[in-house]
Amino acid sequence: MKQRQLRAVNRGSAASEKLEIVRLLRTAAYRRRMDEVWSDFVALAAITFAQLDRRSYAEREVEYLRIVRRYTRDEFEALVQAFIRLPLAFEANVGPGGVPIHFADILGELFMALDLGNSAMGQFFTPNEVSRLVAAMTIDRESIAGHIARNGFVSVHEPAMGGGAMLIQFAAIMAEVGFNYQKQMVAVGVDLSLTAVHMCYIQMALLHIPAVLICGNSLTLETRSVWYTPAYIIGGWASRFPVSPHEPMREVAQRARPRHEIEQEALALVADQYFAV
């Protein structure tokens, strides 16, 4: 493992758990490619967390068993042990009152530590520090407060979510300014890669973020599968922010503000900043 990739997981309070997950996944990959093992690992974990979604339960259970049958008993045990350590890695970042003191794209760090970045497909997961900077630069905190005052929550849409780094950092900023991201935020994320959807789903589930994650194409609005997090189901978001499994992206697009309104607001902001100088 390259030293710079190892440093990504060998830091913070969750370092020991992340290093152990890397070791266990390498053990499971003794007879096959690491990218296969990673895809299978996050698929198994996502399906396990998705059991509350009864609409897709039977279909996902078939996929779960299909994956399991590909591994020997020892290899599958390594995957199970890695799965057990995932919540421990997230819990290591939790402070008093159950609120995370460090929001991190843990699965993105593991993905890069396992040397799975793919330049041909553009699959490189953004470091936490960069995601944090971008989120802080693009999020209008007063606008968030306004949305919550009017609606009781704010919705966040991420059309190319990857493993969910930007959604995680949005939750971090909400927590910083005193809002409860588990009750006052709902996320909608889209990605072409089912593996990325699984990664984001796991992290949203472990952070208890209400979310609807779609494997599909944000440009053509094609939808292949829809994943509702436990927090979305338990929190009754199906009535507060309904997104059907049939045409989810069209529904979300219809809720979005008209483009000309967004452009006018952006021009007004630039004008204010210009004349203020």
Image: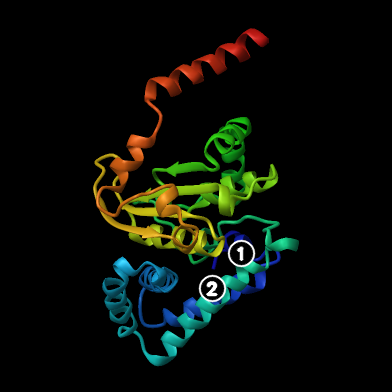
Assess disc 1: are there few (<14), some (14-19) or many (≥20) residues with their C-alpha within 10 Å of its C-alpha: many
**Which label belongs to residue 22?**
2
- The relative height of residue 237 versus residue 141 in the rendered view (above or below) is below
**Which label belongs to residue 131?**
none
- The relative height of residue 156 versus residue 39 in the rendered view (above or below) is above
Residue 201 visible: yes
Q: Secondary structure at mark 2?
A: helix
Query: Distance from label 2 to label 1 (Cα)?
Result: 9 Å
Q: Secondary structure at mark 1?
A: helix
Q: Residue at x 49, y 55 (%)?
A: 210
Quadrant in the rendering for residue 178: top right
Quadrant in the rendering for residue 157: top left
Amino acid carrying label 2: it is Val
Quadrant in the rendering for residue 140: top right
Is 201 left, or right, of 92 in this rendering? Answer: left
Residue 68 spot, x, y in % from top left: 34, 83
Residue 175 spot, x, y in % from top left: 66, 48
Residue 115 spot, x, y in % from top left: 47, 63
Residue 38 visible: no
Residue sticking out furthest to the top: 275
Q: Residue at x 39, y 20 (%)?
A: 260
Residue 216 spot, x, y in % from top left: 29, 51
CB under 8 Å between callouts 2 and 1?
Answer: yes
**Which label belongs to residue 9?**
1
- What is the tally of numbered marks visible in this picture? 2
Earlier sequence position, callout 2 versus callout 1: 1
Q: Residue at x 60, y 13 (%)?
A: 272
